[in-house]
């Protein structure tokens, strides 16, 4: 019988031997062992306990460029600004302990071109950010295989989760069945003390208890042992180390007592310990998975193919559309959306009419009608009708994909308070082991009996079990998962758990005006024409910008043209965010934008208006002026009032004239307004405010991007520019300011619940440990108490759902 040097598996076939005389079960294990040591990763084996690695057999796969692309290309996300920067989400099969995570992180991080790497311990999901100019996709996949693991598309994790749930159910059923039966045997044993049960009968009953206790101890509790071994290999004392020591100590002491003929055994206690602790862990896992699942529902909306025609000079007929992989769609392609289909790409409707349901994205249950020139956001479900639309982005740059990315990355980041709790837990384990030893020594040498009648061994076990830091470890993650899941149901998306903590501590909230406090449904009230000009030039220029004011002017020109005209093509377009736009039209220089913008181009005008304005220059001359007005969002005033009640200072940052900004601020009850700000000035003002306070920025458009990124927390309205959604920390998909109030309250309530959870866990340990050391708590009650404290933390966290 041989033992493999890599996977530690036993085998009888002829061994594969390397140059150093090491024996392996196959060439795969030999090659992996040689590779790890050649790369300086031999430390991996020291982190695994010899003979108990349980490593999977190395995969025989090998990816080339074509096979890697066909299997994983759909999972790649590319940065729109840097197309060579790719993000890959992959499931690494074979990870079962912290040592496996350590090895994968070491190997992949050392690969040239890998910029960022995160591996989730709970899902084995890896997120790899890499530069494909320096390393190819197939190199990353083959490296994972080379170190003994198997990369799979991340969607395979769904079946893995189901398998994990079935395994947990099986373990729990075994523990419950054995516990119920061992209870009856234990009752017979204890009643025998009063009714004179014979020694022979007791031995038979003890053996029956041994048989019933063994499956829970060695099958159900094996999950604790594996986790405990992993912690010990990393020289850490986790809660599973304490649990494992407690269970095995009680069990093997009982085996010794049974074989030596002692009348006192604790098989029932060992069985009950496993049952109550595992049941508590099972309920915690289910609650955590349910909360995490609420963050992944967006991914279920994805479809692989759409009906498309590649970039064409004319609108194609329906018969020309063919199925196309969604990842191959580019901006400018034509897409057909039919009844029952979901839009995967953002675009503008070119022909047809349809009713679309956005409830899966923003929670709105009433379908809305779309027709020619209407914008179509990805994620919308076509309820009836059909439209042909032109893609304005690729799938990677679509609103739905960016939203999914926000939710997908939420599980990687941790709040600062969670990191603190985990650090406390890691030191706590060593302290408990010390107290366990002290209790055992004290009661062994003391000539007194414990109040509960337990001996030194039983008291030491009680201390070991009751002081598990499980509740402390759960205090933060379960609360943040529930909070983010509840917010998602209300169409509020948090980027990660850190955002909740930061948002709860913010003091100032700054708003953009147009599209945030107002509906961005601007209308032209009146116009002044100083000189005649070509309306086609103005329409072309206004249509080239996504700013709400430009859109309003374009609509006005179409509806109120003085004479028929033909829109011409623009050249040399320069769009200056938040200011204006310049271009060349039929050889003539034209420009449009704010008063400050046209002044910078040489226009002379008086500052005599208290409304939003748009100026148009033709051939370097100011030829027209448009006066616009906007409608405030419903509930804006009430939301501002609620924010101020919460103790927040409310500001407004606007590109409009100061007189306009002040008027709106006064109407809404905002503390202070700043007008005539360009995007850079907004960002600088945010940074200035951050010197003395934490700042939240709420915006919706491209001109808010710098301010959103500069703030401690950037909050984007869902209807805003897709790029602002991508860089924000929180997204309000329903565009309702009442959701902003809810998000802030949820963040503050979550932080409060986390503090309550930490208080519960710390007070529990402060009270229970002395009682256990004094002999007032037997091991069985210690297990029940430990599970109860963890469940109490879970139940307290579920209050964030508003159901408990």
Image (cartoon, rainbow, N blue to C red):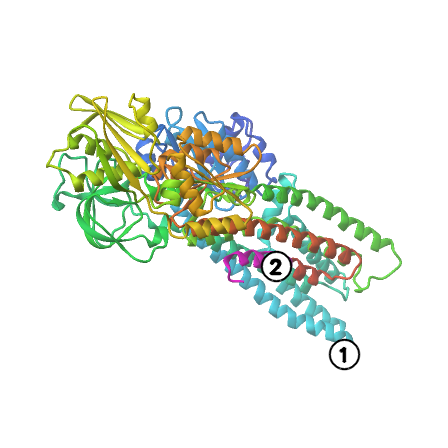
Q: Position of residue 543 (x, y in %)?
A: 23, 35
Q: Is residue 242 visible?
A: yes
Tell me where residue 310 sits by quadrant.
top left
Q: Residue furthest bottom?
A: 195
**Residue 195, labelled with which disc?**
1
For residue 780, side relative to residue 801 (left or right): right
Residue linked to disc 2: 792
Most foreground residue, 556 or 1: 556
The percent position of residue 571, horizontal first and vertical second, equals 21, 24
Q: State the SS at label 2.
A: helix
Residue 432 drawn above or below residue 259: above
Tell me how many marks there are: 2
Q: Which mark is residue 265?
A: none
Q: Which residues are magenta?
A: 787-804
Please identify the quadrant where the C terminus is shown. bottom right
Instruction: Give the x, y percent position of residue 56.
Output: 49, 42
Does 799 lie within the magenta span?
A: yes
Q: Is residue 190 left or right of residue 694?
A: right
Is 270 drawn above or below residue 315 in the view shown? below
Disc 1 secondary structure class: helix
* Dominant SS type (magenta): helix
Q: Earlier in the sequence, mark 1 or mark 2?
A: 1
Which image quarter is the N terminus in? top right
Q: CA distance from mark 1 to mark 2?
A: 41 Å
């Amino acid at each position: 019988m041989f033992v493999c040097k890599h996977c530690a598996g036993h085998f009888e076939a002829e061994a594969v031997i390397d140059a150093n005389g090491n024996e392996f079960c196959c060439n795969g294990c030999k090659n992996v062992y040689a590779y790890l040591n050649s790369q300086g990763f031999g430390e991996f084996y020291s982190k695994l306990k010899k003979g108990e690695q349980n490593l999977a057999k190395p995969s025989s796969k090998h990816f080339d460029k074509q096979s890697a692309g066909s299997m994983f290309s759909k999972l790649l996300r590319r940065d729109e600004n840097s197309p060579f920067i790719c993000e890959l989400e992959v499931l690494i099969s074979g990870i079962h302990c912290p040592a496996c995570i350590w090895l994968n992180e070491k190997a992949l991080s050392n690969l040239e071109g890998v910029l960022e790497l995160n591996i989730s311990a709970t899902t084995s999901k890896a997120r790899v950010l890499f530069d494909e100019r320096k390393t190819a996709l197939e190199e990353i996949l083959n490296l994972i295989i080379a170190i003994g693991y198997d990369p799979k598309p991340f969607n395979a994790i769904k079946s893995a989760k189901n398998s994990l749930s079935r395994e947990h159910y099986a373990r729990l059923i075994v523990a419950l069945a054995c516990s119920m039966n061992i209870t009856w045997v234990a009752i017979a044993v204890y009643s025998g003390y009063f009714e004179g049960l014979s020694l022979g009968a007791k031995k038979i009953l003890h053996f029956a208890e041994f048989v019933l206790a063994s499956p829970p101890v060695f099958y159900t509790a094996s999950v604790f042992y594996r986790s405990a071994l992993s912690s010990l290999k990393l020289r850490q004392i986790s809660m599973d180390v304490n649990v494992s020591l407690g269970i095995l100590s009680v069990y093997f002491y009982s085996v010794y007592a049974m074989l030596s003929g002692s009348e006192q055994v604790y098989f029932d206690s060992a069985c009950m310990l496993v049952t109550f602790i595992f049941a508590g862990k099972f309920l915690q896992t289910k609650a955590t998975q349910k909360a995490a699942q609420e963050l992944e529902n967006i991914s279920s909306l994805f479809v692989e193919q759409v009906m498309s025609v590649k970039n064409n000079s004319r609108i194609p007929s329906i018969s020309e559309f063919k199925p196309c992989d969604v990842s191959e769609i580019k901006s400018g392609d034509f897409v057909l959306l039919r009844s029952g289909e979901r839009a995967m790409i953002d675009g503008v409707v070119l022909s047809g009419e349809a009713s679309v349901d956005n409830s899966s994205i923003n929670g709105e249950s009433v379908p809305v009608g779309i027709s020619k020139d209407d914008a179509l956001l990805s994620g919308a479900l076509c309820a009836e009708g059909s439209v042909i639309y032109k893609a304005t982005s690729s799938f990677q740059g679509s609103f739905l994909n960016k939203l999914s990315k926000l939710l997908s990355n939420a599980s990687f980041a941790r709040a600062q308070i969670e990191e603190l709790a985990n650090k406390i837990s890691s030191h706590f384990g060593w302290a408990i082991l010390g107290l366990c030893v002290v209790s055992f020594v004290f009661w062994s040498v003391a000539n007194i009996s414990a109040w509960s009648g337990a001996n030194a061994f039983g008291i030491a076990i009680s201390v070991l079990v009751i002081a598990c830091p499980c509740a402390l470890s759960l205090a933060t993650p379960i609360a943040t998962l529930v909070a983010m899941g509840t917010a998602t149901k209300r169409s509020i998306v948090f980027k990660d758990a850190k955002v909740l903590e930061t948002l709860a501590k913010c003091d100032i909230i700054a708003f953009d005006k147009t599209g945030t406090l107002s509906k961005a449904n601007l209308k032209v009230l009146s116009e002044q024409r100083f000189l005649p000009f070509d309306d086609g030039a103005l329409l072309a220029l206004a249509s080239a910008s996504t700013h709400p004011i430009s859109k309003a002017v374009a609509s006005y020109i179409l509806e109120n043209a003085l004479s028929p005209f033909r829109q011409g093509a623009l050249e040399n377009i320069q769009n200056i965010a938040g200011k204006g736009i310049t271009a060349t039209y039929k050889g003539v220089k034209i420009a449009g934008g704010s008063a400050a913008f046209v002044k910078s181009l040489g226009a002379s005008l008086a500052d005599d208006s208290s409304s939003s304005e748009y100026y148009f220059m033709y051939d370097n001359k100011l030829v027209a002026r448009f006066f616009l007005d906007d409608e405030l969002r419903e509930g804006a005033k009430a939301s501002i009032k609620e924010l101020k009640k919460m103790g927040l200072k409310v500001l407004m940052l606007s590109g409009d004239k100061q007189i306009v900004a002040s008027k709106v601020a006064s109407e809404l009850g905002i503390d202070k307004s700043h007008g005539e700000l360009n995007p850079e000035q907004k960002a600088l003002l945010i940074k200035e405010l951050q010197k003395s306070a934490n700042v939240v920025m709420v915006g919706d458009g491209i001109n808010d991007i710098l301010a959103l990124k500069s703030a401690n927390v950037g909050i984007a309205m869902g209807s805003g520019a897709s790029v602002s959604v991508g860089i924000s920390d929180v997204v309000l998909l329903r565009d309702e300011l009442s959701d902003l109030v809810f998000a802030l309250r949820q963040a503050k309530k979550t932080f409060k619940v986390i503090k309550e959870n930490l208080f519960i866990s710390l007070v529990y340990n402060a009270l229970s440990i002395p009682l256990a050391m004094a002999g007032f708590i037997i091991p069985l009650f210690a297990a029940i108490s430990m599970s109860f404290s963890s469940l109490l933390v879970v139940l307290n966290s579920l209050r964030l759902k508003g159901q408990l």
